[in-house]
Amino acid sequence: MDATTVRLTTRQKARLEGARKTLERRLGKRLTRGQAVEILSVAAARNPAFLDPPGDVLDLDLEDDPFFNGTLRFKMGKTDARSLDEDLYGA
């Protein structure tokens, strides 16, 4: 088995540890850091879009969107007959 050493900053180590824990939960088994790096590198090789920077800004001009309806309202929580009537009929 060939091994190599990679120097990571504290922030990089924390991110790798977080990714390792996520992989462990998903796979249901313990992983070493090396196994986590291998799994992540295979995933990146299969889907290079993972390496694209995230779009921090979602630029939507909803006023010009013909399918946008600002009058829609969503109510979260418990409902009963009276609250359903209020939502459906505006009573």
Image: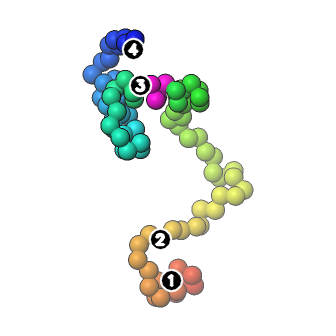
Q: Name the secondary structure under disc 4.
A: loop
Please tell me the numbered disc located at residue 84: 1
3 is higher (above) or lower (below) than 43: above
Where does the magenta region start and end? 37-41
Element at badge 1?
helix
Quick one: label 4, few (<14), some, or many (20+) residues within 10 Å? few
In this rendering, the label closer to the viewer, 2 or 3 = 3
Which is the main secondary structure of the residues drawn in magenta? helix
Between marks 2 and 3, how big is the CA–CA gap? 43 Å
Mark 2 and mark 3 residues within 8 Å of each other at the beta carbon:
no
Q: Give the label on residue 60, or none.
A: none
Q: Which mark is residue 75?
A: 2
Earlier residue among tags 3 and 4: 4
Badges 1 and 4: C-beta atoms under 8 Å apart? no
The type of residue carrying mark 3 is Val
90 with respect to 18 (left or right): right
- In the picture of the structure, the residue carrying the numbered disc 3 is 37
Write down the residue under mark 4: 1
| Label 3 CA crowd tier, 10 Å (few <14, some 14–19, many 20+) | some
